[in-house]
Every structure is written in C-alpha cells, then in structure tokens.
Amino acid sequence: MRKENAGTTNYVVSAFFRFMPSGTCLPGPSPHCKKCGSEIVMKNCFLLLSKPYAMVDYKKPLFTSGDNIWVLPVCTMPDDVKDKSDFELKYSRNGKLSKKLNDCLIQSGADETHIHYLNYYRPVDGEIKENIRTSDYIILPGGEMSSGYRRIRTFGLDAILRDTSATITGISAGALILFQEYFITPNWYYKTFSFDTGLGLLDPDWMIEVHYSSEDEKQNAYLRYVRQIRPQTRIYAIQETGYLFCHSDGRLEMKNVTIF
C-alpha cells in the first residue's frame, strides 16, 4: 500500500472540470490495459454512487421483481456493529443500518424477499459464495475502505466478485474499493490525504471522488492536486445525488457528476 502526502495548490478549478447535470453518456473509449494497451472487455457493469438514494433516479425501475440482490456490508465501520447479534439487529428489515438502503432498493423495483445480506460474523461457506456469484446485483454499501478490503480478502470474496456477471453497485467507500487504486480526501473521518490499493475490479484511466460538493474549497483543492500529479487521469466527482454507470463496453453514463 502506497501513500503520498498532498501539498497546497492554487489552480483554477474551471480549467479542470465540466459539470454533467443530467443523464449523460460518454461514448468511450473503452478501458485499455496499462501494460500492453489492448482493449479490456469488462464482464460487469458498475453503478457508482455517493448515497443509496441516488439509485432511485438512475433508472425506473432499476431492478425487476425476479432479480436476486446480495448486499455485502463489508465496509461497515467496526464501531457501528459490535458482534453477530448486533449485526442481525442493525441489518434487519427496519434496522438502523439497512432501512434506508432497503427502502431505496424497493423504490427502484426490487422485491424485498429477494434482498439478501451477507453476515460477516457467520461462516461464509461455498453455498453462500455461489449464491452471491450467481446473483443479478451485488451491492457494496459505504463505511470504511480498509474494513471492506480486509473482509473481502479474508472471506475470499474478491475471487467471487471477479467471477460474477452481476451488476456491481458501490456506494461511497464501497465504490472506491472497486478500483485498483483510489485516493482519500480528508473529511470528518479521514484526517489525511492518501492513495490506497483497492480490489482492482476497475482499473481504467480515471478515478472517482465521492460526496463531492462544488462549495467545498478544500475538497476541490485536493482534486486539483490529484490532477496535477496525475495529469493523464480524469476524475469523476460524484455529488450526493449523482451516479456514474460504467457499462461493460466502457461507456460512462452519469448525472450530477463534475469532471476534473
């Protein structure tokens, strides 16, 4: 894992971004291997969000009643769930940590009986892994990236995520860890800027920022810094109400996303 510290920058924001206010599709190019330059044909589509309620605006309905949906709350912060009974309480149908997500899934067309949660306090056996692999949608909610990365690797779910044909939805931290590399801008929880290693399910020539606000001068300064040190890397900054949908052929569809 590599980390780099940011310095102060004074670049003009307007020189680096365009704002995409409504459902907009960029036609390409498809991602290419950074080593050999050949085109990558991705097995999955990826829906990247800052907040779960943004999925309600993506497509109506996003899900059909027969879709099997697996929620992997692996990024849950350790202090939010203490043990197995605490997990079952907070991730029940109307649980503190699941209610808003479940409501958004149902509003987007999901059948409540087809929404399944992975309890990482229980053994993750072969049957559960196969059910996840063959599902239609896999959801990675937000929280803490390091916890999500560790739990996915511990249970061998990274191999499942690479093998599945499901559409993978990452929310906040769950979106960031999908990338080969991601960066963290300081906020109430993370105090320092860093680059970190993710799962590598996405490794394009662009990166994302979540919970973006055009009025946050400090956040904008860090994004300009990333563009300064990675001039070939485009950044898609997803607002709270925004989404970025990465099609399997590399096309990007987005709403309320600022491009640096």
Image (cartoon, rainbow, N blue to C red):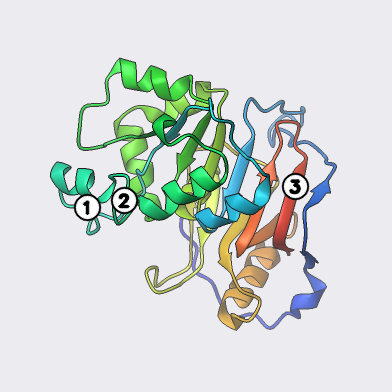
The number of numbered badges drawn on the structure is 3
Q: Is residue 216 left or right of residue 19?
A: left
Q: Secondary structure at mark 1?
A: loop
Q: Residues within 10 Å of mark 2 (few under 14, many from 20)?
A: some
Residue 1 in sight from this viewpoint: no
Residue 67 in sight from this viewpoint: yes
- Dot label at residue 253: 3
Q: Quadrant of residue 247?
A: top right
Residue name at image x 53 percent, y 71 percent: 6
Q: Which residue is mark 2?
A: 94
Does 235 appear above or below 216?
above
State the residue in front, 220 or 81. 81
Does 31 appear above or below 210?
above
Residue name at image x 78 percent, y 66 percent: 19
Q: Is residue 223 left or right of residue 115?
A: right
- Dot label at residue 81: 1
Q: Secondary structure at mark 3?
A: strand
Q: Earlier in the sequence, mark 2 or mark 1?
A: 1
Q: Do labels 2 and 1 touch, CB within 8 Å?
A: no
State the residue in front, 40 or 54. 54
How far across and down, in percent of the image, does residue 182 sit? Answer: 54, 52
Q: Earlier in the sequence, mark 3 or mark 2?
A: 2
Q: Give the mark toward the camera: 3 or 2.
A: 2
